[in-house]
Image (spheres, rainbow, N blue to C red):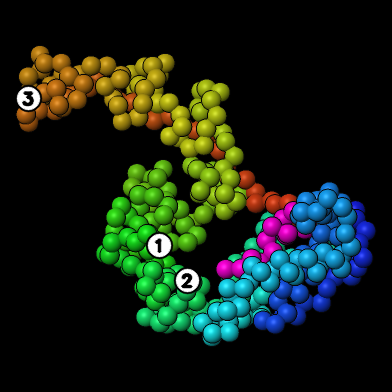
Amino acid sequence: MLIAVAACGGDDSSPPSVSASSGNVCDQIAAVACYDLYQCCSTGEIESYLDVSDPESQDTCKSDLKKRCERAYADVEDSLTANRVKFDADTMNTCLKALLPADGVCASVDTALPWTMACMTSAWVGTVNQGGQCFFTYECANQGTQFCSPSQACMALPTAGMACSAQGCALGNYCNGTTCTAQVGLGMACTSSTACSTGLFCDTAQATPVCSALLAGGTSCPSSEACMSGVCTPGTCEGTATTCVGNNECEGHCSNDTALSCSPGFDYECGEGHCSISTADFCDTASNCPLGETCVLPAMCVAGVCQGSVCSENEITVDYCTGALGAVPAAP
């Protein structure tokens, strides 16, 4: 579905031709940003973005944003001159082209933002190998597995079995308490979604939680992190009007009295029990009984059921004014 938005008049209604290089990257970024501003934004939005109180021309916009960009990229330019980074023109051009509205349509509804994947990777690629001198982490050759240490050398991030660092763990690992641990794949046991590889979530609704594939729109969901869209639309708890996302948000009921509510795992809320051998001794848990005895309870707490919670469809408003301008590449 496309929602046409009337464009505010500008100096240049033709989209810029994108062909970035390390020498003209700020010209290209400014041209794309100013085209989106004057094609899709209101006068007030333009003034707010440019931080001016009076309207200015599209050419002045490009001049101002170019200067702003050059200041922000000063460190990157120094890294480029010193050969600590190289410029990937294809990556930058793919991103900038994705930020331009197609056919002058400034807003649409889609399943994904066209610039999310296109602008995910930095066009500035580090060339400094492990042990080499660096001033910024983006200068290190292996992003995700190295960082620029306080000693100004590219160092390896800790991997599985090593202590977590202030910079975290190497890509493919997570900080499990104080130790880096390798993330696990589909069907593997987990305690949280951070333990699962990219594109998976920890399905704690299972008797034994395992890493599972993200759920599509319309699928019953236990939490928002389980959905591809990132949104689990709430349902209602069985027998009540209480809204819920997942069974753990619903009160349980006692197996011997459905009108009596309880918390799953706390069976003693359904009535006092007795010790397994010395039956005259009343108890709530085994800790109330002599050593070696268990607490026999009269009923169990049955977990509540959340009905109607489903993953929302992944529909996103693609806005080439506020959205695209917010994704304009920044210095690393």
Q: Quadrant of the C terminus?
A: bottom right
Q: Amino acid at mark 3?
A: Pro
Magenta segment: does it hold 330?
A: yes
Q: Are marks 2 and 1 in contact (CB under 8 Å)?
A: yes
Q: Nearer the viewer, residue 15 or 2?
A: 15
205 vs 58, left or right, is left
Furthest-top residue in view?
280
Tell me where the magenta segment starts and ends, as one range: 320-332
Looking at the picture, how far across and down is residue 106, in whole percent?
82, 57
Q: Nearer the viewer, residue 130 or 95?
A: 130
Which marked residue is nearer to the observer: mark 3 or mark 2? 2
Q: Amino acid at mark 2?
A: Thr
Q: Amino acid at mark 1?
A: Gln
* Residue 49, quarter of picture: bottom right
CA distance separating discs 3 and 1: 50 Å
Q: Nearer the viewer, residue 231 or 293?
A: 231
Do we see residue 109 in this rendering? no
Magenta segment: does it hold 327?
A: yes
129 vs 158, left or right, is right
Vertical placement of residue 5 versus 57, above or below: above
Asked which secondary structure carries label 3, the reply is loop
Q: Are marks 3 and 1 in contact (CB under 8 Å)?
A: no
Residue at x 35% of width, y 57% of height:
175
204 vs 222, left or right, is left
Residue corresponding to mark 1? 167
Residue at x 46% of width, y 32% of height:
249
Q: Which mark identifies residue 26? A: none
Residue corresponding to mark 3? 290
